[in-house]
Amino acid sequence: MSQEDKQRITVEIYNRKYTIVGEESERHVKLVANLVDQKMNDIHEVNKQLDTSSLAVLTAVNTMNDYLKLKEDYATLLGSIKKKED
């Protein structure tokens, strides 16, 4: 996909506007932005003293942790399915 084929979508995350450029659908980008915004607000509720940069990093760390857990669960599930097929 060429640069001119990519979409530019403006989203709001933690009260700031960002323009996301990419190949994903507008619906997908807005969903992702909404989830990031929600996670940042959830973390802020527990840690009100965090500045925006620290909050963003903590959100990224939490999100990556969730991703790695899901990846491990997926690998375990695939292993279970493979054993049942054998």
Image: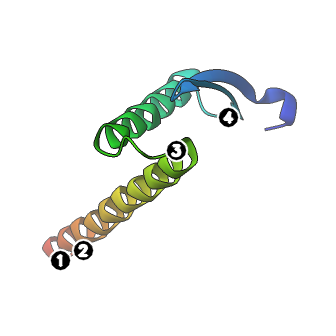
Q: Quadrant of the N terminus?
A: top right
Q: Amino acid at mark 3?
A: Asp
Depth check, front residue: 63 or 27: 63
Q: Is residue 74 above or below residue 55?
A: below
Task: Name the residue rendered at 18%, 78% in the picture.
Answer: 86
Left or right, residue 69 beside residue 80:
right
In the image, residue 21 lies at what x, y percent? Answer: 72, 33
Position of residue 70 measured from the top left corner of the image (x, y, whole percent): 31, 59
Q: Position of residue 62 (x, y in %)?
A: 38, 55
In the image, 15 versus 81, the foreground residue is 15
The alpha-carbon separation of the residues under discs 2 and 1 comes to 6 Å
Quarter-of-image position of residue 61: bottom left
Q: Earlier in the sequence, mark 4 or mark 3?
A: 4
Q: Give the labeled residue for mark 2.
A: 79
Q: Which label is found at residue 23?
A: 4
Q: Marks 4 and 3: which is nearer the front? A: 3
Mark 1–mark 3 distance (CA, rounded to whole Å): 48 Å
Q: Nearer the viewer, residue 60 or 31?
A: 60
Q: What residue is pinned by disc 1?
A: 83
Mark 1: secondary structure? helix
Callout 3: SS: loop
* Disc 4/disc 3 C-alpha distance (Å): 31 Å
Contact between labelled residues 3 and 2, with CB atoms less than 8 Å apart:
no
